[in-house]
Amino acid sequence: MPMSRRTAEQLEQHQEPVPATPPAELRPYWRSSCGRATVYVGDCRNVMPLMGADQFHAVVTDPPYELGFMGKRWDGTGVAYDPRTWEGALRVALPGAHLLAFGGTRTAHRMTCAIEA
């Protein structure tokens, strides 16, 4: 199925570098009482470069579905379709780690192609 013109335009508009500056240090949003689970919140394009390689047993993410939900800017970032996003996830994941990436039923195949790229 060919990519819709709207989706293609969205991808073209979001190929520039991420404008936000990464935080100076990486701080967990939440850590479990046993210390085995940690949640980091932020744009993955800014947060993952601050993490060392081969650290995580799993990467769990729910990126924007790129549907233009109610015209919100956060739902059209292009992050889910950018292979660099998934290269970063692979870098921080341990060998054999699991990836759980949620996607919309109409766009999951595009995210899958970016993951495989």
Image (cartoon, grey):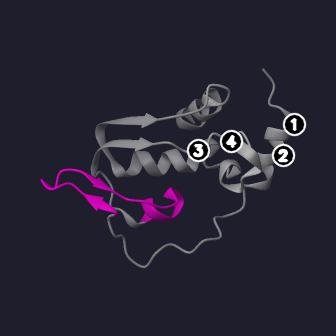
Residue 11 position (above or below residue 47): above
**C-alpha span from label 4 to label 2:** 12 Å
Where does label 4 land, which residue? 66
Query: In the structure shown, which secondary structural element does the residue marked by tag 1 occupy?
Result: helix
The residue at the far front in this view is 70
**Residue hosting label 2:** 9
Spot occupied by residue 51 in the image (x, y as percentages of width and height): 36, 62
Mark 1 → mark 3, Cα distance in angstroms? 20 Å
Q: Is 69 on the left or on the right of 49, as rendered? A: right
Please indicate whether residue 66 sits to the left or right of residue 8 in the image.
left
Q: CA distance from mark 3 to mark 4?
A: 15 Å
Of callouts 2 and 3, the N-terminal one: 2
Q: In the image, is residue 3 above or below residue 29?
A: above
Which residue sits furthest left?
Answer: 34
Q: Residues within 10 Å of mark 4 (few under 14, many from 20)?
A: many
Q: In the rendered image, which quarter contains the C terminus? A: top right
Find out whether the residues at labels 1 and 2 contact each other: C-beta distance under 8 Å. Answer: yes
- Identity of the residue drawn at 64% across and 42% down: 81
CB under 8 Å between callouts 3 and 4? Answer: no
- State the extent of the magenta-drawn residues as a range: 29-49
- Give neighbour class at mark 2: few <14, some 14-19, many 20+ (Cα, 10 Å): few
Label 1, label 4: how many angstroms apart (C-alpha)?
13 Å
Q: Amino acid at mark 4?
A: Glu
Q: Is residue 70 left or right of residue 4?
A: left
Q: Is residue 116 above or below residue 16?
A: above
The residue under label 3 is which amino acid type? Answer: Pro
The residue mark sitting in front, 4 or 2, is 4
Asked which secondary structure carries label 4, the reply is: loop
List x then y, in percent, for residue 91: 40, 50
Q: Label 3 belongs to which residue?
A: 83
